Amino acid sequence: MSEVLVLVDHANGTVRKTTAELLTIARRLGEPSAVFVGDGFDAAKETLAKFGAEKVYRVESADVTDYLVAPQAEVLAQLVADKSPAAVLIPSNSAGKEIAARLAVKTDSGLITDAVDVQAGEGGGVSTTQSVFAGSYTVKASVTKGTPIVTVKPNSAAPEEAAGAAADEVVDVTISDAAKGAKITESKAKEASGRPELTEAAIVVSGGRGTGGDFGPVEAFADSLGAAVGASRAAVDAGWYPHTSQVGQTGKQVSPQLYVAAGISGAIQHRAGMQTSKTIIAVNKDEEAPIFELVDFGVVGDLFQVLPQATEAVKAAKG
């Protein structure tokens, strides 16, 4: 069975859920092998083994960890040349997509980004599903040249446990001077908000222009559900919420199990960032709002009345 390389998404050894999802997908295609860059492998090993990683290629060289994404692309290119994997799976975040693009060039391979489903092809290879043009079309695609390189959106698969050996092997790599053009001079841990990461959350509650700048009901409802909080471009441009929480074409793209849009009209820019959500609920005073064309459930009403009632109902259901 051919190996499938999975680039591990982690923070000092704390493995993010996206990696568990990629390892689950990798088992559909072959034998999962993780590629772990940086410190913290001892903390990560148990999680990697729990989700089926048979091997873990460890890279600890400062020539990789002290620089931005280019050295990681060279690491993966060397592994592709040495191991001839069936595919390479990478998280579909900003860094992951740059790594994947560089890797595709270096290996002369086909690249598919933002896949929402990955399966083994009928005649071998890899078959993917993408949502494109702001969710207007669903596209089936497969790589026809080289090693399939695929970036996968978070929440595209439910993580499934499967015991793996996670046998680690330290990989010696040679990084070119060209890849070391941008060095990391300082890094700072993100302040903990107590809420899930927006792109990884199973539930997202977002607020828009209809909040008038008061995100209190949105945050309270999100906290009752254990959800992440997002915002429309109009809300962040007005300074009501941080740009890091923007959902949309020029913000973050999310694909949770449940997406709640409160006071958001549903312009195409916003829809591009959340249209692949499994279930969508909208709360808006304007019954003609475009968002209602997209939703599974819609509530025509004032979010300042609807959300507090919903929050109390959730709390009551929890006992």
Image (cartoon, grey):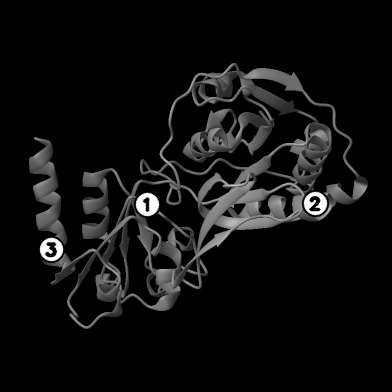
Looking at the rendered structure, the secondary structure element under dot 3 is helix
Please, what is the three-letter code of the amino acid marked with disc 1?
Pro
Q: Residues within 10 Å of mark 2 (few under 14, many from 20)?
A: few
Circle 1: is it few (<14), some (14-19), or many (20+) Cα within 10 Å?
A: many
Disc with the residue nearer the chain's start (2 vs 1): 2
Kindly identify the amino acid type of the residue bearing the numbered disc 2: Ala
Residue identifier under label 1: 256
Give me the residue at 28% from left, 43% from top: 226
Q: Position of residue 106 (x, y in %)?
A: 83, 51
Image position, residue 129 (x, y; %): 51, 57
Please indicate whether residue 202 sits to the left or right of residue 223 in the image. Answer: right
Mark 1 and mark 2 in contact (Cβ < 8 Å)? Answer: no
Instruction: Read off the residue under disc 2.
Output: 182
SS label for mark 1: loop
- First of labels 2, 3 by sequence position: 2
Instruction: State how far apart marks 2 and 1 are (Cα).
Output: 33 Å
Closer to the camera, 208 or 271?
A: 271
Mark positioned earlier in the residue sequence (1 or 3): 1
Q: Which corner quadrant of the image does residue 315 belong to?
A: top left
The amino acid pointed to by label 3 is: Val
Decide: few, some or many residues near mark 3? Use Cα within 10 Å; few <14, some 14-19, many ≥20: some
| Any part of residue 73 in sight | yes
Q: In the image, which disc is placed on residue 306?
A: 3
Secondary structure under the numbered disc 2 in the rendered image:
loop
Tell me if residue 31 comes above or below residue 294 in the rendering: above
Identify whether 173 is placed above or below 299. above
